Image (tube, rainbow, N blue to C red):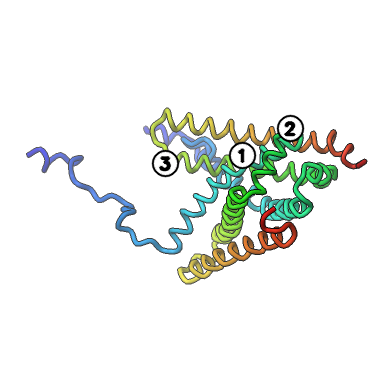
Amino acid sequence: MTQKTDPTSFERPLSPHLQVYRPQLTSMMSIFHRITGAALVAGTALLVGWLWSAAYSPGCFTAIHTFFSGILGKLLLIGWSFAFYYHFCNGIRHLFWDIGKGFEIPNAYRSGYAVLIASAIFTICTWMTVFANTGVSQ
Amino acid sequence: MKHSQVREPLAKVRGLGSAKDGTQHFIWQRITAIVLIPLTFWFIRSLLMISIGGGEQAFVAAWLSSGFSATLLIIMLVALFYHAKLGMQVIIEDYVHSPFPKYTALLLNMVLMYGFAAISIMAVLKLHLYVAPEMGTQ
């Protein structure tokens, strides 16, 4: 009986219901911006280790260099470079939104596709440059 | 009279609400983002040159023997780790709600990001001031 009268006991709608929410390009790219941001923060540990060992520990530097010359290391770097280019391009998209440009739905989709294509092209160009000059297996 | 009505409108505008820092977080996220656009692009280009050279420590030292490169890299590291600190702070504030884990994570984030900045800047300074001259004579 108290169920009906107690205002706190009503089944209120919860929002957003991610399970029944149809994913769109715009929302997926938004969460991916955050995911790549967090992944890049994890990657900064490598940047710090790389710079620190270059200055203070040649042995450690050689170990890092050897690991990232291998297949697993290269795959990690390819992943990070894509995360970087994505966050870079989508960040510029966000800066345009910040000055109030490109909010219309068709433009938001257009810039979304542009970001995906640009980050793919940047990643491919970067690694083609690396592989063309150092060989794939080095 | 409610406490909020006692607060001067000017104090509210200046961002002295319950969060204490108002729009500063948003503004610095954007300032560091804009600064990072050219700097990270230059940094990726430098990494590519080092990697094409072979990636050994001597190439890192030779790169940072230039005062221009060392200065740009330090500016990039300051902007990068401040940007990372602000971004991770938002992620923590959005997903961690219980006070103890939240403030522990926020504190850890601050210590880690400022610590990373300090370590990497020290490494750049050491490479520039002490390691580079030896490498330059090789």
Q: Is residue A107 above or below residue A130?
A: below
Q: Is residue A59 above or below residue A22?
A: above
Q: Chain of mark 3?
A: B
Dot 2 falls on a residue whose secondary structure is loop
Tell me the amino acid under the disc marked 1: Ala
Residue A57 got which mark?
2
- Residue A22, percent from left and from top: 34, 62
Tell me the amino acid under the disc marked 2: Ser
Dot 3 falls on a residue whose secondary structure is helix
- Residue A66, percent from left and from top: 68, 44
Label 3 Cα neighbours within 10 Å, binned few <14 / some 14-19 / many ≥20: few
Residues under numbered marks 1 and 3 in contact, where contact means CB atoms less than 8 Å apart: no
Depth-wise, is mark 1 or mark 3 nearer the camera? 1
Question: Is residue B54 or residue A34 the one in the foreground?
Answer: B54
Say if labels 2 and 1 share a chain. Answer: yes
Residue A18 got which mark?
none
Specify which label sits upstream in the sequence, 2 or 1. 1
Q: Chain of mark 2?
A: A
Tell me the amino acid under the disc marked 3: Tyr
> At x 67% / y 60%, what residue is drawn?
A126
Q: Which residue is mark 3?
A: B95
> At x 48% / y 59%, what residue is drawn?
A29
Q: Chain of mark 1?
A: A
Q: Is residue A48 left or right of residue A3?
A: right
Depth-wise, is mark 2 or mark 1 nearer the camera? 2
Question: Is residue A72 or residue B59 the one in the foreground?
Answer: A72
Depth-wise, is mark 2 or mark 3 nearer the camera? 2
> At x 59% / y 59%, what residue is drawn?
A89
Task: For marks 2 and 3, give the CA distance.
Answer: 38 Å
Q: Which residue is mark 1?
A: A45
Q: Is residue A32 visible?
A: yes
